[in-house]
Amino acid sequence: MGAISTAFSAAALDPSQWDAAMEVADKATGSAGALLFDVKGCFPRIPHSQSAAPAFESYVEGGWINRDERYRLTPSLMRNGVATDLDLFTPDDIATHPYYQEFLAPLGLRWYAAVKVAAGDDFWCISLQRSIDRGPFSPIELAELAKLSRQLGPSVAVARALGFARAEAASDAFSASGTAVIMLDRGGKVILVNQAGERLL
């Protein structure tokens, strides 16, 4: 799991590395795909490993993004740092549920673990997909993932701080040219306004 922590630290400093971090998470956990979601809002894009691309395409195009049962795991994920399908469903439920049989099964996928990555108000989730044949994450693996969750928070804090630093630098550049800047967070709240922008409000 140390490789995942290292990859997250690198991506926090260089956002172009988030897909690479997902590749590391994919391989280090024996998964068939890894994605990084912003639970509270929406990243401009969803960082993911290459192996997760077909599933993510089907997830969006098939409308499963609006019917994702796994969002019901959020309270458990917040409490425990990790959550799986088996926190929500029995194996018998999974064997007949459309989400698993119509969406995941044709892709050879079934099992899942979510890993909380959080700091302050930021709440991200590493979504780890496993194949039908590989089987669910074991209790030992889940304990390791919960430990990883506690280690990744500083990367979120660094990424957020650098995001604000970049926003302020961009604002300064626009201000130098007399251009108005009003920056909003993902919830639509104003987080940064330069002098020219204030005149528009």
Image (tube, helix red, strand yellow):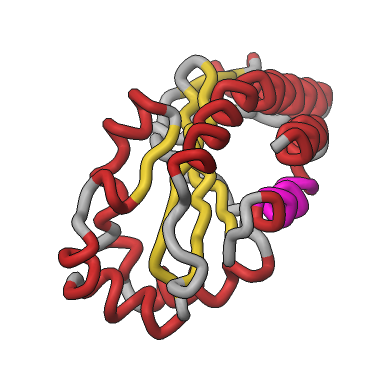
The front one of 141 and 171 is 141
Q: In the image, what residue occupies the spot 29% across and 58% down?
A: 68
141 vs 41, left or right, is right
Q: In the image, what residue occupies the spot 68% across and 25% down?
A: 155
- Inspect the magenta stretch and tell me whether residue 97 lies in it: no
In the rendered image, residue 93, in percent from the top left (x then y), is placed at 16, 64
Tell me where residue 79 sits by quadrant: top left
**Where the N terminus falls, by quadrant?**
top right
- Quick check: can you spot residue 199? no
Tell me where residue 54 sits by quadrant: bottom right
Range of magenta residues: 17-25
The front one of 66 and 91 is 91
Q: In the image, what residue occupies the spot 77% across and 30% down?
A: 9
- Quick check: can you spot residue 80? yes
Query: With respect to residue 166, does 45 lie above or below?
Result: below
Query: With respect to residue 8, does 23 lie above or below?
Result: below
Tell me where residue 41 sits by quadrant: top left
In the rendered image, residue 96, in percent from the top left (x then y), is placed at 17, 74
127 vs 45, left or right, is left
The front one of 96 and 14 is 96
The front one of 29 and 55 is 29
Q: In the image, what residue occupies the spot 58% across and 19% down?
A: 192
